[in-house]
DNA sequence: TAGGCCATCTGGTCCT
DNA sequence: AGGACCAGATGGCCTA
């Protein structure tokens, strides 16, 4: 590993990367990669990177027509464009391109993670201590969008239990617990397969939302760290705006539905809805391979 | 220790 | 040609 190559990689990093906290890690990663290669640095590049690169390119041009001659008559001749010989200069350029591409890819993924973080903050369960995984964030967001769509479509205020059930559909048990913790509910009270075994006192607790303030303290709920969650987070309205949480919201929102101007909380909801849609769509499409689920497809079906 | 999650690298493809 | 995007591979970290 020569000095100039390290400097060049650092320069590339500074050009392509933003202020990520793990930038040092990324940078060292590339350095490690370069170190692993046994290609010696071109002498010119030690003096002047720019000149060195130009020289390399010139040298490379001269070798452009050079082709691999293995001289092995036993093997059938390969069709198509012949593979160019990997000269030192070409190897260097290749590495440089790769490093640039890696930096771009890191940056791209960081952008994606930023978008996911934004999404985490607007889905109805945000915790700095217990972060939702990417896949669970997307699932929860999908459920959230669906739930909001249903509200807008039906024009009815939802039962809390159905709302929570909709939110937790397909989520893992830990995430369901987390959402429950955020809502200060016991997962047992709304998980369908478990609700049948619900003790009588719990069954009363699973009544409609208006009959069950979410300040309901659950006996079996694990203790924090859970995300703090209040009704204002669910619908992104200021908590002090309404004495009781959701009911007034729906009343207002549904009244406003008839208004062409869509002012008030509904407007906020719609705006939030659109924003969530954008982020989910972007995240889902980008994460398709990583999440291994057709969230994008599901999303389109939902719409 | 296995499994889940994540960041990163990498080669391929498509687009400008 | 170069950048964006994608999907597979890999290794590290954490937790049950």
Image: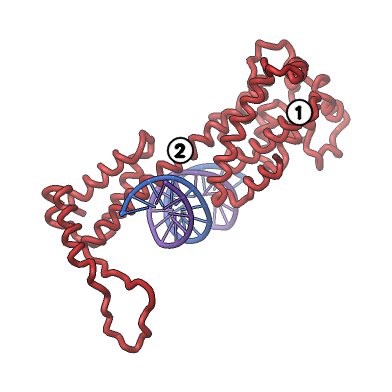
Chain colours: A red, B purple, C blue
State which chain disc 1 sits on.
Answer: A
At 56% across and 35% down in the image, what residue appears? A279
The answer to whether residue A241 is above or below residue C16 is above
Left or right relative to A34: residue A149: right
Which residue is more in the foreground, A180 or A159? A159
Could you say where residue A278 lies in the image, as x and y percent from the top left? Answer: 58, 35
Left or right relative to A252: residue A133: left
Q: Secondary structure at mark 1?
A: helix
Which residue is more in the foreground, A230 or A46? A46
C-alpha gap between disc 2 and disc 1: 31 Å
At 27% across and 84% down in the image, what residue appears? A71
At 24% across and 57% down in the image, what residue appears? A92
At 67% across and 11% down in the image, what residue appears? A241
Residue A2: give its label: none
Q: Secondary structure at mark 2?
A: helix
Where is the C terminus of chain A found, in terms of image quarters?
top right
The answer to whether residue A126 is above or below residue A25 is above
Left or right relative to A133: residue A16: left
Q: Residue furthest right?
A: A200
Left or right relative to A233: residue A155: right
Do discs 2 and 1 share a chain? yes
Residue A151: give its label: 1
State which chain disc 2 sits on.
Answer: A
Q: Which residue is mark 2?
A: A111
Q: Residues within 10 Å of mark 2 (few under 14, many from 20)?
A: few
């Amino acid at each position: 590993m020569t000095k100039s190559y390290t400097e060049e990689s650092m320069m590339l990093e500074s050009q392509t990367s933003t202020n990520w906290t793990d930038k040092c890690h990324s940078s060292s990663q590339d350095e490690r990669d370069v170190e692993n290669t046994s290609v010696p640095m071109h002498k010119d590049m030690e003096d002047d990177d720019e000149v060195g690169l130009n020289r390399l390119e010139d040298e490379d041009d001269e070798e452009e027509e050079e082709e691999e001659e293995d001289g092995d008559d036993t093997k059938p001749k390969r069709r198509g464009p012949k593979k160019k010989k990997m000269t030192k200069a070409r190897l260097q350029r290749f590495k440089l391109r790769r490093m640039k591409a890696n930096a771009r890819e890191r940056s791209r993924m960081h952008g994606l993670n930023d978008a996911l973080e934004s999404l985490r903050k607007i889905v109805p369960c945000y915790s700095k201590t217990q972060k939702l995984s990417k896949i669970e964030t997307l699932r929860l967001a999908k459920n959230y969008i669906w739930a909001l769509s249903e509200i807008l479509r039906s024009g009815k205020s939802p039962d809390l239990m159905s709302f929570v059930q909709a939110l937790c559909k397909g989520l893992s048990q830990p995430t369901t617990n987390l959402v429950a913790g955020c809502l200060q509910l016991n997962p047992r009270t709304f998980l369908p397969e478990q609700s049948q075994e619900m003790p009588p006192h719990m069954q009363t607790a699973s009544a409609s939302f208006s009959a069950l303030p979410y300040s309901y303290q659950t006996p079996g709920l694990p203790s924090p760290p859970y995300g703090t969650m209040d009704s204002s987070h669910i619908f992104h309205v200021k908590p002090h705006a309404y004495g009781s949480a959701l009911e007034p919201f729906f009343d207002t929102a549904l009244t406003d539905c008839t208004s062409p101007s869509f002012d008030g909380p509904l407007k906020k909801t719609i705006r939030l809805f659109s924003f969530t849609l954008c982020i989910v769509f972007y995240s889902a499409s980008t994460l398709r391979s990583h999440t291994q689920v057709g969230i994008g497809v599901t999303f389109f079906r939902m719409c």
